[in-house]
Amino acid sequence: MWNPEWQVEHRIVLRYGEIALKGGNRIFFESKLLKNLKEQLKPLTGTKITKEHGRLYVQCSQAHYEEVMDILSRIYGLVSYSPARVVSLELEEIEAGAIEEMRLALADFKGKQPTFKVEVKRTNKNYGMTSPEMTKHLGGILLKAYPELKVDVHHPELQVVLEVRDRVYIFSRTIKGQGGMPYKTGGRAMLLLSGGIDSPVAGYLMAKRGVEIEAVHFHSYPYTSERAKEKVLTLARKLCAYTGRVRIHSVNLLEIQQAIIANCPSEEMTILSRRFMMAIATEIAKERDCGALVTGESLGQVASQTMEGIAVTTDATSLPVLRPLIAFDKVDITAIAKAIDTFETSILPFEDCCTVFLPDKVVTKPKVADIRDSEALLDVSGLIANAIKGMEAQIIRAEETFEL
Amino acid sequence: MIYLDNAATTQVHSEVIDLVVKYMASQFGNPASLHHMGLESEKALKNARGLIAKHLNCQPDQIVFTSGGSESNNWVIQRLMESEQGHAIVSGVEHPSVLEAVKAMQGKGFSVTTIPVNQLGTVSTENIVKSITPHTKLVSIMLVNNELGTIQPIENIVRELRNSGYQGFIHTDATQAAGKIRLNLKHLDVDFLSLSAHKCHGPKGVGLLYMKRPQTIKPLIFGGGQESNQRSGTHNLPGIVGMAKAIAIADTHIQENWAHVSALRAHVIEKLRENPDIAFFSGPVSSTCDQSPFGGNTDWAVPHILSIGIKYAKSEVVLHALEAKGIMVSSGSACSSNKKKQISHVIEALGVDKTYAEGIIRMSFSSKNTLNEVDTAAQSLLDVLNTLHFPR
């Protein structure tokens, strides 16, 4: 029986597959991964990150274990990680530890009975039992504790691995990580963030490729409420769970939308608004050293997101536009939104700027030349300059402080 | 004045009072209002919920604000017992807001099993598991008992019930536990938990119900749709914010308060041993306030509540005699003070000897009491007992 008096220490081995392929760049990516890990784990005092045998290990106490595992689940660049229980060389502790590890591993199989195998790696030559002896002994102990299970030494569905060193490291689970590249290894991009379901997902996906994300958000206060703005800030905070912090710029689009209504064909309202957003985002992006824009656009979702529509909005910027969702179905985007916990916030009923000024008919196949003509009726540079002058910027962090 | 009736209610922290005043005097907007003042109040509500969730280790959307422990208890019990057929299990020492609600809902089709307690007021996990039937919809066992301070092995009970394949719900009334033992809702794993602010130096008239899965039971109160349509009614924002602050303060200082109160209790027991007519009915106290040691079936109690039995005495007489010396204690449980019965149902459930049963005094301590205060109180009790003569 596991004795709660025994000190439990945890050591989690981290695996980073993709960056291992990069040869010369490996050192750069590894050091960035290490830096990101250190930053995220800093508040958990006593947690250490070490590098041994070409792998990274996180060491933590029982008290911090749950939190550490939670943070690791959101670190970009980790392909998988395995938590190991660290026990002393006392056989009683090793046996109890193995049984406990098995119990946790079985929970992942949800009632199914996996075949298993025990594997022992013994680097401590002073330890009494040999590897085969230990394997056999522990196999027997586990079969006694879990009589419904069967051993399969060739193709086991579950492996209980014990590394015998100055202490014994027992692990049985491999947990899938976020994948992707370490954050901030892929340049910086400006995300056009709205309160909808798509743009937060787009931001998350680009961040996963190592791109540092800054955001710009458009509102039409007082036509849109403060609550709508709060909703976007909340979505940015949800992204912070993965990126650490996000710098978000808020721009009031009201003057521009009113100018469009007054001077341009009503069915072009949406496409013209979007061009202004792209142009404004581009100026802020250049100011902030961003090499690209990111949007949540997907083909065929709304009227302005036809191929023609995308051609017209892309024409408003000179920066590359990254659209990770361009080929995604709504149902798949929604699944990601739920996984990253932005979905519930996105569906809150506070109107975004686009919908408030939605005309009855929307042009679906706009032509660049026609739209440029309509735009020429406006003082484009003046409107853009004004909008940027009134811009507010703030840095959103993941930790909520709950001020009362 | 020496206040030793903290299990009845507690003095509100001054920081909590300041917050309550702020949300009455300047930030008094209705969180449901669309304007800026409403938004500011809504943010405060969100922060209060987030702060509480952080300290109780649960998610903000698992917390619903109510008017207190009695409402939370009634909500769970009334909704889970409203079907024609069913079975519920409670302990014999639950608070009246649980027992009376259960009694009211009990009917021809809905039966109730009352689990007995041992001498120290603890229920046995085995008894509870044995009493489960295929019709059992609710098991409700309080976390800390208000008259004796007994800590029930809830973590153990939950684990055993879930392992046994129990499909119903598990509720715990944690009103007396808040601020005393460290609450970790994730580890406790109950389906419902009731809590009240005024037992942990927060304002009266506000509490919460923790629901492991939101929207599990229909609302008791319909109306404006507050609390995600689970509990309508304009939010008592000053109370809620005050409660959040009180819970935060309690959780932050929980171990040092536990140590302090343990010392006070030990001193009182030591002093009162002088009198051979005095017996103690509360159980032993652990050195740690974390709930996990109590997961097992051992008899533990919180140091904050001390049940003192005085042979042949009449408790109300002793109470008033102490009151005359400026010392406030309780006899029986505060909520039951209207009852005609002299002996509380908890004491009766323990099977306490008749010679002590009518002379039970409850001293309940808080972190605000000092060693001098409890020393004076203990001395006063000894003096009072020397002057009062009860027929043997």
Image (tube, helix red, strand yellow):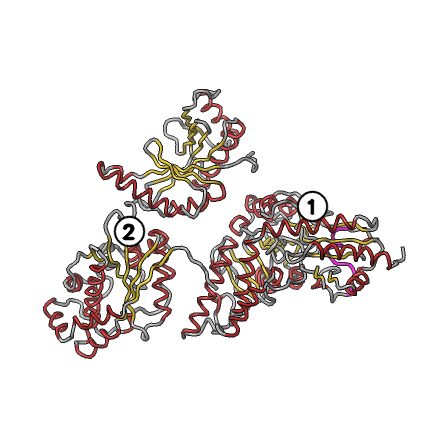
Q: Chain of mark 2?
A: A
Which residue is tagged 2?
A: A207
| Horizontal side, residue B26 vs residue A274: left or right | right
Rendered view: B184 above or below A120: below
Q: Quadrant of residue A381?
A: bottom left
Task: Residue B94 in the image: state x and y as whole percent.
Answer: 67, 56
Residue at far front of view:
B372
Query: At label 2, which amino acid type do we have?
Result: Ala
Which residue is tagged 1?
A: B284
Q: What span is in magenta?
A: B340-351
Distance CA(mark 2)–CA(mark 1): 55 Å
Secondary structure under tag 2 reads helix
Task: Residue B381 in the image: state x and y as whole percent.
Answer: 79, 57
Q: Quadrant of residue A169?
A: top left
Residue at far right of view:
B391
Residue B284 forms part of the magenta stretch:
no
Report the quarter where the N terminus of chain A lies.
top right
| Horizontal side, residue B172 vs residue B54: left or right | right
Residue B345 forms part of the magenta stretch:
yes
Crowd rating for badge 2 (residues with CA inside 10 Å; few <14, some 14–19, many 20+): many
Q: Quadrant of residue B221?
A: bottom right
Q: Chain of mark 1?
A: B
Q: Does residue B78 appear in this view? A: no
Query: At label 1, which amino acid type do we have?
Result: Pro
Rendered view: A363 above or below B149: below
